[in-house]
Image (tube, helix red, strand yellow):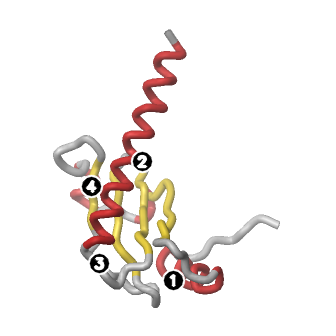
Amino acid sequence: MASKTKKAQVSAKLVAEKSEEAMIAGILEGSPDGIGVVVVRLECGCRKMAAVDKEGEPASKVIIYRDLAESICDKCKEDNGDFMRVAESFIYWVQPEPAKDQKQLITAKVLGTAPTPH
């Protein structure tokens, strides 16, 4: 029984990742200057995404959604997905990816920097 539950959780996670890929493709399609898409996963399960250009500037509007739901959660409706509730964030880069230095600059500009352990 436990293995079925674990398998269902893995399947649900894969569905979420596939839906992120579909959203990323849609954002990039409408953003000719986009070289990547910022993906912010919130603790509540909602996602925020936006295309970014080669200067680290927005190349699309910010889209907020929740997988398999008609609407975003009530908390996100209140605070628009506040950064204090971010669980994970990254940039999905278009191929070919920018140079490592450019990626680091854009990532720092868009997502900020955090101390790294020594």
Q: Please state, as top left, top right, bottom left or bottom right, where the C terminus lies in the image.
A: bottom right
Q: Amino acid at mark 2?
A: Glu
- Mark 4–mark 1 Cα distance, whole angstroms, equals 23 Å
Question: Which amino acid is tagged 1?
Answer: Lys
Q: Amino acid at mark 3?
A: Ser
Q: Position of residue 114 (x, y in %)?
A: 63, 71
Q: Which residue appears at 37% of the width and 63% of the height?
A: 82
Q: CA distance from mark 4 to mark 3?
A: 18 Å
Number of the front mark, 4 or 2: 2
Q: Position of residue 66 (x, y in %)?
A: 28, 49
Nearer to us in this view, 112 or 79: 112
Q: Amino acid at mark 4?
A: Tyr
Residue position marked by numbered label 2 in the rendering: 17
Q: CA distance from mark 1 to mark 2?
A: 25 Å
Return the residue at label 4: 65
Residue 15 found in image quarter: top left
Extreme residue in the left direction: 70
Q: Kindly identify which residue carries mark 3.
A: 31
Element under disc 2:
helix
> Disc 1 marks which residue?
109
